[in-house]
Amino acid sequence: MAKLGDFEFPEVELADSIELARRIHEDLSGEVRRDGLAVILDMSPTGGAYGARIGALRMWGLATGRSIIKLTSDAEKLASTADSNEESVVITTLARSVPLFNELQDRLGDGSLDQRVLTVMLQEITGAEMDEITRRVPMVERIFGSIRGLIQGFDTENRPESQLSTNNTSRAGWIEFRYDDGNLRFRETPENIDVLINVLQARKSQLRGN
């Protein structure tokens, strides 16, 4: 798993992690030693790519354990159900497992996923250095973008306390920009105002058909 500030996030998309969980369910009865799974996947048990896959299983709420990987009840339900509605509910629940992505969605609303805005928001949320954020933005954009449709409209009142932000985005010192595609919210700083100007200029060009 990757990390920005105190926020961890998976490096493997939810769909790929679900596919692996189903394989563990079908071929290994839902539980397997970490090194044994590496053999089955033909991967090095100490390699970064393998670690990312195992970390993603845990972060998406599909598995627990370190030396022994065991599927969660949600993963078992997803792997065994033949009910498409139940499957959809479980996948939506799993998509909401990553606090960083929930924070991003809260601020983006239905707005487009502009990489410049995403960069600013990641710094606001995580407090990480800009160099690190810049390096991680493409990965965050890819992973977050792949599940964003599932977490839109998520009711924050029902979110676990551990996933709620300590920031109050309604207090003074924040910019809120509303437009047809959605809305954006971030702190009022000179740098963020520059970003907003760039977004508005891009929006202007789009409306002109340039």
Image (cartoon, rainbow, N blue to C red):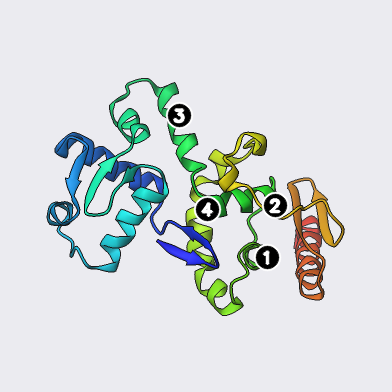
Separation of residues labelled 4 and 1 (CA atoms)? 17 Å
* Residue drawn where x is 67% and y is 35% of the image: 157
Q: Amino acid at mark 3?
A: Ser
**What element does badge 3 sit on?**
helix
Separation of residues labelled 2 and 1 (CA atoms)? 11 Å
Quarter of the image where the N terminus is located? bottom left
Separation of residues labelled 3 and 2 (CA atoms)? 25 Å
Q: Are marks 2 and 1 in contact (CB under 8 Å)?
A: yes
Q: Residues within 10 Å of mark 4 (few under 14, many from 20)?
A: many
Q: Residues within 10 Å of mark 3 (few under 14, many from 20)?
A: few
Q: Amino acid at mark 2?
A: Arg
Quarter of the image where the C terminus is located? bottom right
Residue at image mark 1? 124
Q: Amino acid at mark 1?
A: Glu
Q: Residues within 10 Å of mark 1 (few under 14, many from 20)?
A: few
For discs 3 and 2, the disc positioned in front in the rendered view: 2
Which comes before the other along the chain, label 3 or label 1?
A: 3
Which comes before the other along the chain, label 4 or label 1?
A: 1
Q: Amino acid at mark 4?
A: Phe
Viewer-side residue, 71 vs 89: 71
**What element does badge 4 sit on?**
helix
User: Horizontal placement of 39 versus 122: left or right?
Assistant: left
Residue at image mark 3? 88
Residue at image mark 2? 107
Residue at image mark 4? 144
x and y percentages locating residue 129 in the rendered image: 59, 77
Which comes before the other along the chain, label 4 or label 2?
A: 2
Viewer-side residue, 195 vs 33: 33
**What element does badge 2 sit on?**
helix
**What element does badge 1 sit on?**
helix
User: Residue furthest toward the top?
Assistant: 83
Image quadrant assignment for residue 6: bottom right
